[in-house]
Image (tube, rainbow, N blue to C red):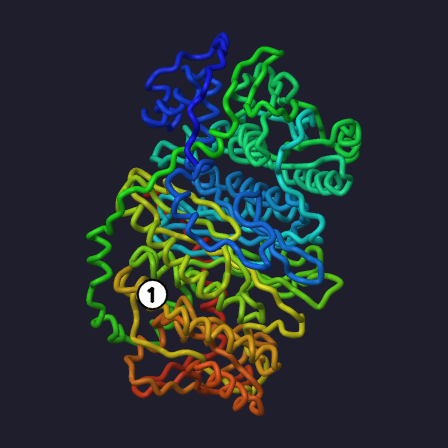
Amino acid sequence: MSAPDSTHAVPVAPRPGDPDITAELVDEHGLSPKEYERIQRIMGREPTFTELGVFSAMWSEHCGYKNSKRLLSTLPTKAPWVIQGPGENAGVIDIGDGYALAFKIESHNHPSAVEPYQGAATGVGGILRDIFTMGARPIAVLDSLRFGDLDSGRVRYLFSGVVEGIGDYGNCVGIPNIGGEVQFDRGYEGNPIVNAMCLGLMKKEELITAVAEGAGRPLMAVGARTGRDGIHGATFASEELSEDSDESSRPQVQVGDPFTEKLLLEASLELIASGAISAIQDMGAAGITSSASEMAGRGGSGVDLEMADVPVREPGMTPYEILLSESQERMLVVAEEGREDEVHRILEKWELEAAVIGQVTDHGRFRILENGEVVADIPALPLTEGCPTYERPGEESEEVRGLREMDLSEHLIPRGDLVKSFLLVLGSPNVASKRWIHDQYDTTVRTSTVVPPGGDAGVVRIRGTRRAVAATTDCNGRYVYLEPGTGARAAVAEAARNLVCTGALPTAITNNLNFGNPLKPHIYHQFRESILGMKEACQVFETPVTGGNVSFYNETDGRAIYPTPVIGMVGVVEDVDHITPQGFQEPDHRIVLLGENTAELGGSEYLYVTADLVAGPPPRVDLLAERDLQRAVLSMVHKGLLASAHDCSEGGLACCLAESALKGVEGGLGISVRLEDALPPVAVLFGEAQGRIVVSCAPDDERAVLEVAESHGVPARSIGTVRDADHRFSVTLPDATLEVPLARLSETYEGALPALMDSPTPSSD
């Protein structure tokens, strides 16, 4: 929607001490000359310094989605089970038995690159608030992380700080961490990616939305006081970093307090249940500015806010600072008239503050006062609906095209001993056990976690029912870099496979779209093609997009990250008896491969660790075949045929089999597998062909498993047998054999990441 021109200018006197508006100041606020001219037309005059700050925040990429909104509007968002789609704090779906699930994923990339501990911690705090402002109690968090290679001392510093920040904040609030993903690649050297996802549970009738309506209703700030931390955080998140960003951007990083967050969570849910408020919104990016203007925009109303009434931590804060502060653990609520004292009592019970700072109006304006004097007066709707949106020119990079078209045939020939290559891939940070990481998280608090981190997807039981919800985050940035549409389809497909492997029906997604500078044609090309690929996959799988986040400008000194459209997918398990483990369960069980091996090696972990190469076409994605595979596995699960199931992804079939063996009962089980493929051994063992799942079953159920696969048109074959713990890991091919003692596999898989983290910091860092 385009912003209407102002029909009349509302005069506002410049505030004493505020700087004059210059072209340089406008540029510092991240606004182009044309955007500033648009603001002047809307206002009918020159904006004040405070008004410029408000527009800067609301028209930033982080809040206004100006370079992504048009493409995002093409994604499928509706389904009979979708209660709330994009546009609110979180998406909400119906999961049966009268329950609804709120879920969303958000990024905190830029803050984490500058101050990793606080950046990650406040990222967790922000996503928790997005969930409980919907009326849902958070029941689980996940995280999707990307870093450069661990041979860099700086990367290890960032990684340790992020993991510690995630763990400390979530543990203190008491929300279990049930999974996620971590990937390491030089493509993320300058910019770590820190995405946090949260799930929340509520009864359907408990849903509340952030709509400010009803002239005269009081607006109240609740929770922590407002300080000077995080000012212009939204604008900071909408610009590239540089080598000097660490020090210069540190004041724009918020500081979190998880103990206050826990109190705010309980107070907010009690407020919602009391009926004393009609709306609530987190003061997240752009703080009071975004929460007040977005609530007014949704309600078609206006707001008056008195800055002198906002509880602050520091004396002398200006309206500009108060409006744009991103201090954590704060909410803006619309109270019912006459019930302000009730809001105060509830907040006091939880040792938090509440203050009336304004009211809802019917004048349709975002009006800011300081001791009764108007310091900003802006038409409300243009702040949220009038942000200019763009479709940028997009063109593929010649460099990437050259990498994709590279001949990889020489890499299909084994480089020396296959066992050595296998252990190198299995022990790489992207494949090896992440136990070292998730052992720092509380994964079982609240005692509803059924499948903790380390499986294909995390699973949480819904108490009082037979149901459970499963969730996963997935994306292979190398695939997206090499071919964005294929990579995005692969991300959605892998997320769905991970869910069905646990016994869950894929139901909906939230996405976190991490890209470089969209003003560069090759970056916009990556973004556009990724959206188109995601759209296609979601339509085929019937997994609507209920919301998410766009994080652009993930570049340092002009070098962008791999395009990384992370998929956060949720699914419903109808009966907890259907939950399927990843590891093999008993000796003599049969191992069945669903799907076909191929000779595709592009973008694989094998190429990266053996040849230091990211090249070739990524593996093809047949969406209809993927859908058939999902349906076949769920049918097997519901018939009680499977003892285990595991998606085949990074590291290929060899690593998939190793993980199922190592995560088997009693500390691991051996296997004896024979593969008769007429393909090079490297391709069979380490190729990352899509659409494959390894399952195991009792000998008596083997025929039934193969028959179910056949009935769904899914290629399936029995490839081997589970052995006892004393047996070796043995895979026989027509021209090669891979045989490793289980103890050596375990040592490689479990010890690789801690060993890398403990290595000395290079002096060059």
Q: Is residue 378 above or below residue 651?
A: above
Q: Quadrant of residue 59?
A: top left
Looking at the rendered structure, the number of numbered marks drawn on it comes to 1
Instruction: Report the residue at 76% width, 31% height from top.
Output: 343
Disc 1 element: loop
Q: Is residue 746 above or below residue 340?
A: below
Give residue 217's position: percent from left, percent from top.
69, 27
Who is closer to the viewer here, 691 or 359?
359
Who is closer to the viewer here, 579 or 121?
579
Instruction: Report the residue at 43% width, 74% height from top.
Output: 692
Judge left or right: residue 592 versus residue 128: left
Instruction: Report the residue at 47% width, 75% height from top.
Output: 629
Asked if residue 235 shows in the view, the reply is no
Amino acid at dot 1: Ser
Direction front: furthest residue: 7
Give residue 181's position: percent from left, percent from top.
48, 57
Judge left or right: residue 613 versus residue 173: left
Q: Quadrant of the C terminus?
A: top left
Q: Is residue 290 above or below residue 478?
A: above
Residue receiving disc 1: 604
Q: Quadrant of residue 335?
A: top right
Q: Quadrant of the N terminus?
A: top left
